[in-house]
Amino acid sequence: MHILSLTIVILCVKVVQILSKKYYKWLHGIYIILVASLAIGWYPESRTQNLVQLTKSMKKNVETVCLLDENNRLFLQGVAETDQTERKLREQTEERQRRVVKTIDKKKTKKVMAVGDNSRKILERIVEAEAGDQDMKGRMLVANVILNRMRSKHFPNTVKGVVFAPRQFSPVSNGSYYRVHVSGRTRQAVKKALQGEDASKGALYFMCRSASSARNISWFDRDLTRLFSHGCHEFFR
């Protein structure tokens, strides 16, 4: 009978080693019952010492299991918090990257146009003829329109081809293109346009309404999209 009881106690100790914290109160109750049984003499005195040591070991194992369970809970909590922190940092990094991309998109890369000396002189002369009485921006816008046409598949891809295309620029048709004196401001405006400064919004056409025929005005208003005006010129696409 005593051997059976001792065996039961040993089995209890083994079970305790794998049980979680939620069984602590129940196991502690068993421990109290065993100690009480010793007090009322259910076990022979010769085995009391061994059983006391065994029950102490049982209590220690229960406390160890509980401590391990608490450590495991804290560890899992720490892992979860770390994952959450890393996720937040990753989201913040991705958001910063998206903002950088948007900023780059807003600050469009300047479209530098490389042309030879002869093409540059043609560009300067047509800008002087068309916008010699305009401010710096007005001159640059005329240069921008010509450069935009060079990039478009619907127009020639050279300065000369664009400027001397039939019935495109009135200074070429009426001969004023050949009579102008190119000013320093016009040269500076053309230089800026070639270096990529562009406020034209992709305009491919411009006109001075007060100096245009009714037929041309009607075509501009009917067939093109008006973008904006600057000085005496209106710009279209």
Image (cartoon, grey):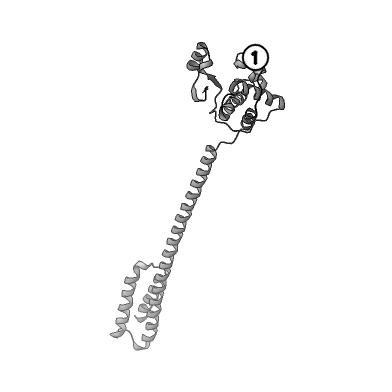
Q: Residue at x 32, y 71 (%)?
A: 25
- Looking at the image, which is closer to me, 61 or 222? 222
Residue at x 48%, y 53% (from the top left corner): 89
Where does residue 58 sit, x and y in percent of width and height? Answer: 39, 76
Question: Would residue 199 appear left or right of 4 to someone viewing this image?
Answer: right
User: Where residue 192 sits in the image (x, y, percent)?
Assistant: 62, 32
Is 164 drawn above or below residue 91 in the view shown? above
Answer few, some or many: residues within 10 Å of disc 1's Cα (few below 14, many 20 plus, some between 14 and 19): few
Q: Where residue 237 sits: x, y (%)?
A: 53, 22
Q: Residue furthest right?
A: 117
* Image location of residue 147, percent across then percent down: 61, 26
Q: In the displayed orientation, state which residue is furthest to the top.
A: 215
The answer to whether 150 is drawn above or below residue 170 in the figure is below
Q: Residue at x 56, y 25 (%)?
A: 134
Which residue lies at the image location 52% right of the left edge and 12% below the top edge?
213
From the viewer's perspective, is residue 192 above or below residue 32? above
Q: How many numbered circles does the render carry?
A: 1
Residue 165 appears in the figure: no
List the residue tagged with mark 1. Answer: 175
Which element is circle 1 on? loop
Residue situated in front as seen by the camera: 88 or 230: 230
Residue lying at the far bottom in this picture: please name it.
Answer: 46
Could you tell me the amino acid type at mark 1? Gly
Q: Front-most of 144 and 76?
A: 144
Quadrant in which residue 126 is drawn: top right
Q: Is residue 118 among what the camera can see?
A: yes
Left-right relation of 78 to 200: left
Q: Quadrant of the N terminus?
A: bottom left
Judged left or right of residue 214, residue 112 is: right
